[in-house]
Amino acid sequence: MKLWPVRRLKGTIRLPGDKSISHRAALIAGVAEKTSRLTNFSTSRDCESTLTCLEQLGVNVTRSATSITIQPSDHLRAPAGPLNCGNSGSTMRMLAGLVASNCLTCELTGDDSLTSRPMKRIIEPLEMMGATIQSSAGKPPLVIAGTSPLKAITYKLPVASAQVKSCVLFAGLNALGRTTVIEPTTTRDHTERLFNGFGVTVETSELPDQSTSISVDGPARFTGGEMTIPGDISSAAYFVAAATLLPRSELTIADVCLNPTRTEFISLLRSWGGEIESIETRSDRNEPVGSINVSSARSAAENQPRMIDRNAVPALIDELPLLAVVGSQLGGVEIRGAAELRVKETDRIKATVKNLRAMGADVEEFDEGLFVKGPTKLRGALIESYGDHRIAMAFSVAALLADGPSEVAGASCVDISFPEFFDLLRQVVES
């Protein structure tokens, strides 16, 4: 994909359904009582992987242009072959909990990227609950053997992770008794909100050490129904960043997810000088929805290095490569405590450092982060996506700001999360 610098972003857009919410809503609908209809379901390849796996488990999925209808069976059935999760770590981690909870024996696998990612963080709690799991040194394929109901446990997450938390809560649906997850730092809470929204009570409380306890009592079953999935806030981040950095931009993103565990990126850019307004207009299954209005950053924003430390990382994990690009245009940014970026679709720290250097930025790489100096006038360059959708989109934003044209190699990987990205970008850029 070849990209040229632009003057500004202007207009109004609506985004495909939030990927995190779509995954969870589909899994919930797949084991609910009654049929569910999910409108504005994510168009990402990752969420299609979740739907395909549900179909292999005996769930009927009907797709239309604007919605999907999910008709569950009385119980999930063992699939005829491996469940292919594609590139989706979310699918594999949460589906593993659901499969183990339903006493099924099956194999979960994926593409080369997914089968290289560590899964020990879900294997440990599931085995504590009584599941038997075979893996290749803690990596996929995972063979889960379920022969009897799981037992309820209290599990303290060694590292804050919404996907691991969700895996354990899904596993607790058919466990006898109360399953509790304790997370040291608050992570995105879509699972808790949607469990409650579809009729399974989740109790959340803050503990004296400021960690959070999240509990579900099993056995429990959801009640299906209708939901309109809000626009993806992580996808919105790229447009928000570009509109913040390009002078005289005026952009509105309508009907987008405003879940407070997902808007830290917005709050951070606002604190860095961004003129960003968010307005909540409705709620659906406990998920707040509204609009985001963005204009260019205040010229008086302090031109000094910013710091993102390990305590902020869980709420910003998807946006960190993009924040490195943003920081290069301000006074610089230092990111620490983000070792998890090394084991995403690619090594996102290394990919971010290499691409920023290719565009002329001065960057220092750490084991668990990076420091990019700024402000730097980026130059057009050949950008390598490394097959990672978030790297491709972050550096597409960088290309809009650069001197001269840039080319993003392997740009089609954006289909993993946001197939409409480049089309929507064309609608709002002004050269």
Image: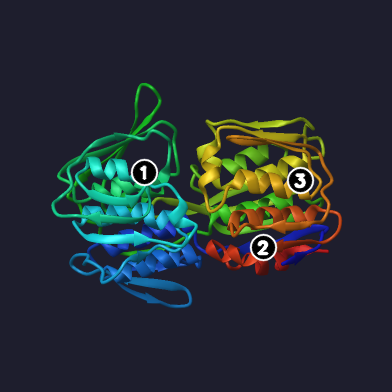
User: Dot 3: few (<14), some (14–19), or many (≥20) neighbours within 10 Å?
Assistant: some
Closest to the observer, 10 or 121: 121
Q: Is residue 127 left or right of residue 280?
A: left
The kind of residue on which mark 2 rests is: Thr
Label 2 near label 1: C-beta < 8 Å?
Answer: no
Q: Quadrant of the C terminus?
A: bottom right
x, y percent for residue 139: 39, 50
The kind of residue on which mark 3 rests is: Arg
User: Dot 1: few (<14), some (14–19), or many (≥20) neighbours within 10 Å?
Assistant: some
| Observer able to see residue 2 | yes
Q: Quadrant of residue 99?
A: bottom left
Q: Quadrant of the N terminus?
A: bottom right
Q: Earlier in the sequence, mark 1 or mark 3?
A: 1
Look at discs 1 and 2 and give the one toward the viewer. 1
- Residue beneath label 1, please? 120
Color encoding of the figure? rainbow
- Residue beneath label 3, please? 357
Q: Please give the label number shown on residue 12.
A: 2
Label 3 near label 2: C-beta < 8 Å?
Answer: no
